[in-house]
Amino acid sequence: MAALLPLRARHCLITGAYGGIGAAIATRFAAEGALVTLLGRKEDKLRDLCARLPPFPDSRLAPLSAATATSSPHVREDKPAHSYAVMDVSADGRDDAVLDGTCPIHSQQRTGQIDVLVNAAGIAQFQLLQNTSSQTARELVDTNLMGTIFMSRYMAQRMKRRRADRDGKSEQRSFLLTMSFHLQACIINIASLLAEKGSPGTSVYAASKAGIIGFTHALSVELGPQRIRANAIVPGYIETNMLASMSREPLEKRIPLGRLGRPDEVADAAVFLAQNTYANNCILNLDGGLSAV
């Protein structure tokens, strides 16, 4: 059955991995056969989620897929396994060494190649603009927008370095590793319906998410010729901790389907975008019809 898994042996990086949407995507990707690397700021949450993921199913791909040997306790050395790395996506490249250590650029193993990047890291603070401090505004933009930009830049630079490494060592690479270079890579950005539908108290958050949509449009054109697709999911109101302080009933009354979305439904969309090789510049609204009213 492993051969039927749509993300079989694809290596997927997920930022904001322990959040409601990030965790759902990580779990679904692992269930679909992907080798998952979780990224986030809190090691305990990353460790707990990593332990709960469906195990990487195909040990027969060990030469291509084995986790890179390391002394770090969160990467197992005996077989292909999911892993995690503690990092801040808004650090403007300062944590690139963490990524390079988790996914060695010159590795002939599967972790050396990044097939899918999901930019799910995000924070939310809702308050009127006149009450928003400069620090709060910077934190929102740095995490939500700049973190997405920095991670996407890292992936684009890394793909270029990997191709150069491949071309310089063509006689040493395995057939399976060679084939992996012919698979398209994919960036999936998580935006928000608030980027498109105004609401009081969301101005800075909305700006950070609207930037992601514009960034995705440009990225799809810029990176498409390099065989890197760029798409975005635009969730409406999803059952996550971000909505815990909001009254549920008024929200549901505004949504044509009459309910909030579930994180696993966002994960369904992420799987589609990850595996559909013609999906590029897709801005996928997932809001129960709220964007139409």
Image: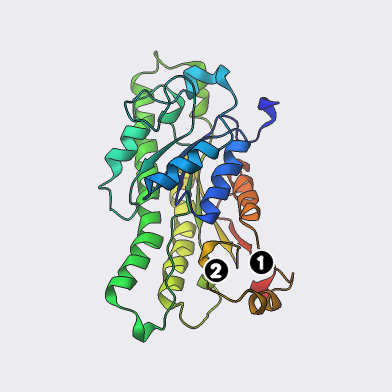
The residue labelled by disc 2 is 243
Between residues 285 and 267, which one lies in front from this camera angle? Answer: 267
Q: Position of residue 185 (x, y in %)?
A: 50, 39
Residue type beneath disc 1: Leu
Q: Is disc 2 placed on a helix, strand or loop?
A: helix
Image quarter where the N terminus lies is top right
Q: Residue furthest bottom?
A: 130
Q: Earlier in the sequence, mark 1 or mark 2?
A: 2
Q: Is residue 87 above or below residue 135?
A: above
Q: Is residue 79 left or right of residue 68?
A: right
Crowding at mark 2 (Cα within 10 Å: few <14, some 14-19, many 20+): few
Q: Is residue 97 left or right of residue 102?
A: left
Between residues 100 and 81, which one lies in front from this camera angle? Answer: 81
What separation in Å lies between label 1 and label 2 (alpha carbons)? 10 Å
Q: Is disc 1 placed on a helix, strand or loop?
A: loop
Crowding at mark 1 (Cα within 10 Å: few <14, some 14-19, many 20+): some
Residue type beneath disc 2: Leu
Q: Which image quadrant is residue 128 in? A: bottom left
Q: Position of residue 127 (x, y in %)?
A: 42, 80
- The residue lying at 57 percent from left, 31 percent from top is 55
- Check whether the beta carbons of the residues at disc 1 and disc 2 lie within 8 A of each other: yes
The residue labelled by disc 1 is 260
Image quarter where the C terminus lies is bottom right
Between residues 84 and 186, which one lies in front from this camera angle? Answer: 84
Q: Is residue 52 left or right of residue 103?
A: right
Q: Position of residue 187 (x, y in %)?
A: 49, 47
Q: Residue furthest right?
A: 257
- The residue lying at 38 percent from left, 49 percent from top is 42
